Image (cartoon, rainbow, N blue to C red):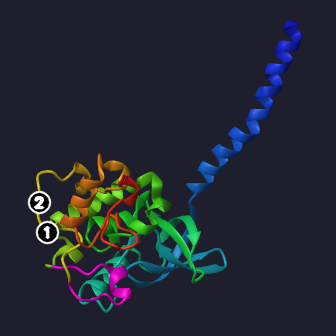
Amino acid sequence: MKKVLISTIALLLMMGLPAMSAERNSRETAQVRSPGKVVSVGDGDTMRVQQGHRISTVRLACVDAPEIKQAPYGRQAANRLKQLLPPGKAVQLRPVTTDRYGRMVAEVYVDGKSINLALVQEGQAVVYREYLNGCSETQSQYLQAENAARQNKRGFWNQPNPVMPADFRAGRSQPAQSSSKPVQQPTSLPACVNSDCDCGDFSSWEEAQRVLQAFPNDPFRLDRDRDGVACESLRR
């Protein structure tokens, strides 16, 4: 009986190993970095990289730089990226996905430091919240870096009413209330407004709605259908 029990346990363990191994390999693959050399920089968040005999266009993951037409910030962002990544510079790429234009979306590292994150820290790019899940391991670092850049008015944030790059591309280019500054600062706002809020951070729908009203440009994407109501799942 004891031998049968031991054999059964061993079999169960062996059956579980492939799944555990696959999960571990999946996590490791997500963090794999491949070497390359910079060919050129297009704008504040786009570059071309050579890997072996192949040259690819790379879109920096999880960040969004001002468009070139968003003077002077778009040109400043592009020039800064050119300083950080001159032609021939050795880089490490952590691919995230391929976008609809066929570009590799990736985090770019030099000497172990993320160029994507550096741009946010300097105010040369904003966090692209819609795609921030591509940088899940460093998500909090991106949000904290943007908050610090915003508070210290670095780069793009050194203007009264910044138009977010995504809004500019969508044609919403008229300056509005800054998405980064609340219209008012009620003492009842939760601490998450200093980094990033989602619907799970609120104790009630009323609290979520107060945040939406304080930040009318909805930087936390609490009102995804744009009907003026935050976190509808919290309403009873």
Q: Is 183 in front, or is 169?
A: 183
Q: Is 225 in front, or is 92?
A: 225
Image quarter of residue 151: bottom left
Inter-mark Cα distance, 2 to 1: 7 Å
Circle 1 packing at 10 Å, graded few (<14), some (14-19), many (20+), is: few
* Residue 66 left/right relative to 35: left
Q: Is residue 34 above or below residue 124?
A: above
Given the image, on which type of amino acid does mark 2 rest? Gln
Per the rendering, the mark at residue 205 is none
Q: Position of residue 97 (x, y in %)?
A: 58, 68
Residue drawn at 76 percent across, 27 percent down: 13
Q: Is residue 175 visible?
A: yes
Image quarter of residue 229: bottom left
Image quarter of residue 34: bottom right
* Residue 15 left/right relative to 220: right
Residue drawn at 16 percent across, 70 percent down: 153
Q: Identify the element where label 1 is drawn.
A: loop
Residue at the front extreme? 236
Q: Position of residue 173 (x, y in %)?
A: 28, 89
User: Magenta stretch: residue 60 in it?
Assistant: no
Q: Is 156 in front, or is 225?
A: 225
Query: Which segment did they paint magenta?
Result: 161-175
Do residues under tags 2 and 1 come within 8 Å of each other at their CB atoms?
A: no
Q: Is 48 in front, or is 162?
A: 162
Q: Identify the element where label 2 is drawn.
A: loop
Quadrant of the drawing holding the N terminus: top right
Given the image, on which type of amino acid does mark 1 rest? Val
Residue at the top extreme? 1
The residue pinned by badge 1 equals: 183
Q: Position of residue 17 (x, y in %)?
A: 74, 35
Per the rendering, the mark at residue 185 is 2
Circle 2 packing at 10 Å, graded few (<14), some (14-19), many (20+), is: few
